[in-house]
Image (tube, rainbow, N blue to C red):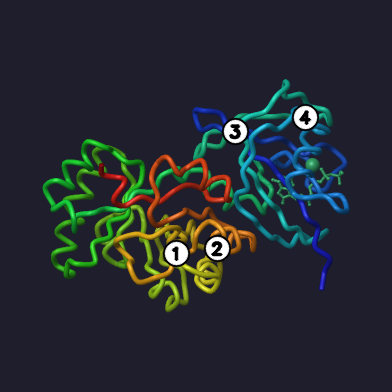
Amino acid sequence: MRKITHVAAGILLRADGSFLLGSRPAGKPYAGYWEFPGGKLESGETELAALKRELVEEMGIAVTAATPWIVQTFDYPHASVRLSFFRISDWEGEITAHEGQEFAWQVPGKLNVSPILPANGPILRGLALPDVMTISNVAELGEAAFLEALAKNKPHWLILREPQLDAAQYRLLAEKVLRICKHQQTRLMLHDDAELALALGADGVHLPARSLLKLKKRPALDWVGASTHNAAELGAASALSLDYALLGHISDTPSHPDAAPLGWDGFDALLKQGWPFPVYALGGMKRSDLGTAMQHGAHGVALMRAAWV
Ligand SMILES: Nc1nc2c([nH]c(=O)n2[C@@H]2O[C@H](COP(=O)(O)OP(=O)(O)OP(=O)(O)O)[C@@H](O)[C@H]2O)c(=O)[nH]1
Ligand SMILES: [Mg+2]
């Protein structure tokens, strides 16, 4: 087996959602390619310590707020790398090119530099995902109140999950919801029906775990995510190159009264394995749990009830 090189890399984020890329200096493999600042772990070093050291060395900044994010493995001709990415929301010092590199602030989905290091594609997609993933709740609110709340709250993304409806009722609802979503630029993920998502022109499909485990191939939609509860399901999401997973439930929630909660300890243990996509904390979450969830390596929180109050 090839030796694996462990690397820590940081995504500096500004409040407007833009993020920083640097160009690889002359003399390194892939010189001129754009990457996230960072570098190899030294022996005995943690990922976070390596990240902090590299950003001092390469760009003269002290990282003061970083949360663990995606872990991506990739085989290059010169090395197999395991990249631990962190999101960095705060730092001290002026960004300075200590190695002759260039820096460029970028907007998710609208890059104006190239080429990007080959391992970084999925990472860039992940940056377009919202902090809060909302899940519909027609079952409890009723259709009229839900549609009103949707138009009022204008979430960035919505998963339309209404298992109490039959296929015909779900399609009718999906058509109505899609009209509202298109109008207000909410991205819409339909639940468990890739064909309907394709037919209606929704942004993607969200798979329940039972469907995720049966699929052989990623559905041909722009965005595909799944609900997961354990390592086997996260592994299936990884094998299908999904864009995100919801993982839960974190605490007791009325929608799944029988299943034992993971708690943050269970969530940590699963995230420690490192997944190549953003993971949302699900189950009993509120907006105010976002900071805690991110400390535990989540991309964000998935809200059902709490999204509509
Ligand atoms: N820093 C960084 N490295 C990445 C990214 N994506 C990616 O595939 N890599 C790979 O990770 C490996 C290590 O990165 P590096 O060359 O920055 O390591 P380093 O700063 O310690 O450099 P050095 O070996 O000259 O001291 C390289 O093979 C690089 O191609 C990324 O976004 N940022
Ligand atoms: Mg480096």
Q: Is 111 on the left or on the right of 95, as rendered? A: left
Neighbour tally class for label 1: few under 14, some 14-19, many 20 plus, Cα within 10 Å: some
User: In the shown orientation, is residue 35 left or right of residue 110?
Assistant: right
Q: Is mark 1 within 8 Å of ligand 1?
A: no
Tag 1 and tag 2, C-beta contact below 8 Å: yes
The answer to whether marks 2 and 3 mark residues whose Cβ atoms lie closer than 8 Å is no
SS category of the residue bearing label 1: loop
Kind of residue sitting beneath label 3? Ser
Residue to which mark 2 is pinned: 266
Task: Residue at 56%, 37% (x, y): give it.
Answer: 111
Residue 66 found in image quarter: top right
Mark 4 → mark 3, Cα distance in angstroms: 16 Å
Identify residue for label 3. 89
Q: Residue furthest top?
A: 94
| Badge 2 element | helix
- Contact between marks 4 and 2 (CB within 8 A): the answer is no
Mark 4 or 2, closer to the camera: 2
Tag 3, which secondary structure?
strand
Q: Residue 184: give x, y in percent of width and height.
A: 27, 37
Q: Quadrant of residue 101?
A: top right
Image quadrant holding the N terminus, namely: bottom right
Dot 2 amino acid type: Gly
**Cα gap from disc 1 to disc 2, whole angstroms:** 8 Å
CA–CA distance in space, label 2 to label 3? 26 Å
Q: Position of residue 169 (x, y in %)?
A: 14, 64
How crowded pointer 3 is (Cα within 10 Å; few <14, some 14-19, many 20+) is rated as some
